Amino acid sequence: MEIEVFNQTVVSLRERLLKVAASLEDGDVEAEDFVQETFLRLWAMRHQLDTHPNIEALAVKTIKGIAIDHWRHRQHECAEREHTREIVVEQESLAAKDDMELIGLIVGHLPPLQQQIFRLKDVEGYENEEIAKICGCTPDALRQNLSRARRRIQKEFIRLTTGGMKICK
């Protein structure tokens, strides 16, 4: 099939194909893309079109196939994105778990009073007055020990996660 005949028989179906594509897909941009892709596929098989009994039906069938291919591709991409998101969430969860274990090790190496105050305040959620009674210390001493414990935990955590692996005592 020569280009003039192709233009008369296939390209003249453009409006019909646009309507079909628009009914299959939301958006004129994708509908236009589907029509163009249909023309490309039909042009690739132009030598067989001379003997085809119904070129319009073939064009409609082709554009529907293209729409289905694009839909499947989008579904596959969505599934891949979801799978990737699940992996990232799992890795973040494992990293958070590892960080909590590391903090637990650091807390285990604090002086006993700082360790007890930190656990009561930041792990158990006790109020300062309750902690002061349990530990037998003044509110000022409690705040000072809690501050020292938090600074030491932060310092050791940063040191361990950025380089060295020895927990200082």
Image: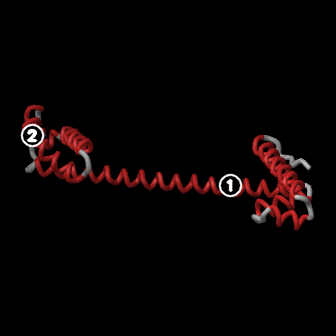
Q: Quadrant of residue 12?
A: top left
Q: Position of residue 137 (x, y in %)?
A: 91, 61
Asked if 1 appears above or below 127 in the picture, the reply is: above
The amino acid type found where label 2 is placed reads Ser
Asked if 76 appears above or below 37 in the picture, the reply is: below
Q: Earlier in the sequence, mark 1 or mark 2?
A: 2
Q: What is the count of numbered marks? A: 2
Q: Which mark is residue 96?
A: 1
Gap between marks 1 and 2 measured at Cα = 62 Å
The amino acid type found where label 1 is placed reads Ala
Q: Secondary structure at mark 1?
A: helix
Would residue 141 be found to the left or right of residue 71 on screen? right
Front-most of 78 and 3? 78
Mark 1 or 2: in front is 1
The residue carrying mark 2 is: 12
Front-most of 8 and 2? 8
Q: Secondary structure at mark 2?
A: helix
Image quadrant containing the N terminus = top left
Residue 62 in view here: no
What's the residue at 7%, 37% (across, down)?
Answer: 8
What's the residue at 10%, 35% (across, down)?
Answer: 7
Would residue 152 be found to the left or right of residue 48 on screen? right
Would residue 166 be found to the left or right of residue 50 on screen? right
